[in-house]
Image: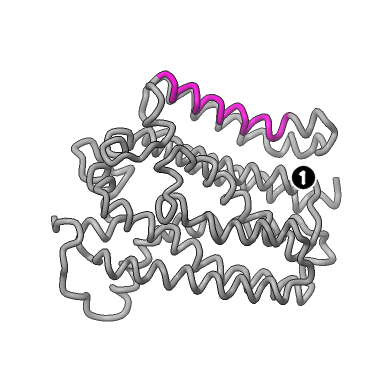
């Protein structure tokens, strides 16, 4: 194994180099975030989904999203290598196949910190330019949508880089906002309104990502604590962290239950999202039983993708319900 940050000879050919950067940006998770655009598109009225300006705005927003997400993932790894947290968390004796080292080309020496940082900043600039174009050419630019888009661009990379919000106990708030905003921002630019069911869907998308991160942070307590990264998992006791994850689980369910009880979303929505509720409760109760944080994290990915599936099913069926 090559030491973190070690200079190595560049791979021959374009594809091997692209592969390194694809793993650096965690392309599988970037694709998961792109599911937000499917939610946005299916949430629109059917007669607007193929509207030219709408499709163009979504395309331009998607081009920018590639850059922003690549920057978030890349700069997170840059910080993790610089402060040693990734070394502690990924090279520990209890690392398993649920967290393969190949996801971290900075740790294996396939890329240098300088290469990654340069790439991350370029990706962020790329994202900012395309989102500016999307905003200027969008069919609608409500003030609230503009604010969400700007905050998303600025805050998304601050999770562990720049302001390093996750080092001061604000990472969970940052992640919930950012993931939810990946639904809210393009919907604002294409539709200009915010129906209650879209806000609920955005929050479900946000909690889906937050509850992946929450269990990941639980696995990383030792390494994060060693470098001063103050996640809730680090600051709380073991029991306190269990309660925190339970609160997040309950809030995830309440995002559906409260609007339904208030009459903001129909019974069909609550019925369509029942599978994610069942899986979310199973994730948490199983974690309380076995304490296996990485397994709970892996189940969280399944819950997230199930959430998206449930939401898409409802959106497509909504005109006939």
| Residue at (68% x, 34% y) in the render | 255
280 over 44 or under it: above or below? above
* Whole-percent x, y for residue 203 in the image: 65, 43
Secondary structure of the residue carrying numbered label 1: helix
237 or 251, which lies in front?
Answer: 237
Query: Main structural element of the magenta stretch: helix, strand or loop?
Result: helix
* Whole-percent x, y for residue 151 in the image: 60, 56
- Judge the density around disc 1: few (<14), some (14-19), many (≥20) Cα neighbours within 10 Å: some
The quadrant the N terminus occupies is bottom left
Residue that numbered label 1 is attached to: 197
| Residue at (29% x, 56% y) in the render | 104
* In the image: residue 127, left or right of residue 136: left
Q: Is residue 124 magenta?
A: no
The quadrant the C terminus occupies is top right
* Whole-percent x, y for residue 275 in the image: 63, 35
147 over 89 or under it: above or below? below
Q: Quadrant of residue 221?
A: top left
Q: Is residue 248 magenta?
A: yes
* In the image: residue 157, left or right of residue 12: right
206 or 315, which lies in front?
Answer: 206
| Residue at (74% x, 46% y) in the render | 314
176 or 46, which lies in front?
Answer: 176
Q: Quadrant of residue 254?
A: top right
* In the image: residue 77, left or right of residue 258: left
The residue segment tinted magenta is 239-257
Identify the image's colour scheme: rainbow, by chain, secondary structure or one colour: one colour
How many labels were placed on the picture?
1
* Whole-percent x, y for residue 219 in the image: 34, 35
260 or 98, which lies in front?
Answer: 260
| Residue at (48% x, 59% y) in the render | 30
271 over 138 or under it: above or below? above
């Amino acid at each position: 194994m090559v030491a973190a940050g070690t200079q190595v000879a560049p791979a021959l050919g374009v594809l091997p180099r692209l592969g390194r950067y694809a793993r650096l940006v965690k392309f599988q998770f970037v694709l998961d975030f792109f599911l937000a655009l499917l939610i946005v598109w299916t949430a629109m009225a059917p007669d607007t989904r193929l509207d030219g300006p709408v499709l163009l705005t979504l395309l331009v927003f998607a081009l920018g999203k590639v850059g922003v997400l690549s920057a978030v993932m890349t700069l997170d790894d840059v910080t993790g290598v610089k402060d040693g947290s990734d070394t502690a968390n990924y090279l520990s004796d209890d690392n398993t196949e649920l967290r393969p080292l190949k996801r971290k080309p900075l740790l294996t020496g396939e890329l240098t910190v300088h290469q990654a940082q340069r790439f991350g900043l370029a990706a962020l600039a790329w994202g900012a330019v395309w989102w500016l174009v999307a905003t200027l050419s969008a069919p609608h630019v409500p003030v609230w949508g503009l604010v969400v888009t700007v905050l998303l661009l600025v805050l998304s990379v601050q999770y562990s880089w720049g302001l390093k919000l996750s080092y001061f106990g604000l990472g969970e708030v940052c992640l919930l906002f950012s993931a939810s905003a990946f639904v809210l921002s393009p919907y604002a630019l294409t539709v200009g309104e915010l129906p209650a069911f879209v806000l609920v869907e955005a929050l479900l998308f946000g909690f889906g990502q937050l509850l992946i991160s929450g269990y990941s942070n639980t696995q990383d307590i030792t390494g994060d604590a060693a470098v001063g990264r103050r996640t809730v998992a680090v600051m709380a006791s073991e029991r306190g962290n269990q309660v925190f994850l339970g609160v997040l689980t309950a809030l995830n369910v309440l995002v559906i239950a409260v609007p339904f009880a208030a009459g903001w979303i129909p019974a069909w929505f609550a019925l369509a999202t029942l599978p994610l509720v069942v899986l979310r409760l199973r994730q948490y109760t199983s974690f309380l039983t076995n304490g296996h944080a990485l397994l709970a994290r892996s189940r969280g990915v399944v819950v997230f993708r199930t959430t998206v599936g449930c939401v898409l099913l409802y959106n497509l069926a909504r005109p006939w319900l």
